[in-house]
Amino acid sequence: KTIVITGNTESPITKHADVTLLTVSQETRAETIVSRVAQHAMTDALYVAVSLRMIDVAVENEKRIWESVIPKSV
């Protein structure tokens, strides 16, 4: 499955998507902070949803991540 996260329903990439998720915000500054936060929240929610379906794999992967960043002597 292919999931596309975009703010534009007419984006060419949507033609290749099985699922299109829209994150739209009204930016009032040149920086696109609000839309980036919305997209990050969407990807985080997807990660959590997939992790809950594969909880054993997710727990093992999280353990491996923590072991790679925290020194063994701590």
Image (cartoon, helix red, strand yellow):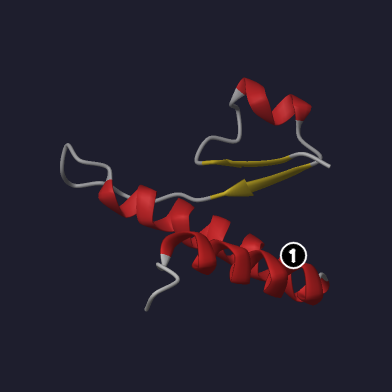
Q: Residue 74, how many percent across, how many down?
A: 37, 79
Instruction: Give the amino acid type for the residue marked by disc 1 in the picture.
Output: Val
**Residue at position x 43%, y 57% from top?**
38
Q: In which quarter of the image is residue 65?
A: bottom right
The front one of 7 and 45 is 45
Q: Which residue is at the far left?
A: 29
Horizontal arrangement in the rendering, residue 35 relative to residue 18 (left or right):
left
Q: For mark 1, does the 10 Å Cα neighbourhood hold few (<14), some (14 to 19), or many (20 or more) residues? A: few
**Residue at 59% over, 26% down:** 11
Q: Is residue 5 left or right of residue 57?
A: left
Task: Tell me where residue 71 appears, x and y as whole percent.
Answer: 40, 67
Please identify the quarter of the rendering in which residue 69 is found: bottom left
> To which quarter of the image does residue 20 belong?
top right
Residue 33 percent location from the top left of the image: 27, 49
Task: Provide the secondary structure element on which disc 1 rests.
Answer: helix
Furthest-top residue in view?
Answer: 12
Residue 10 image offset from top left, x and y in percent: 60, 28
Residue bearing mark 1: 50
Residue shown at 65% from the left, 25% from the top = 13
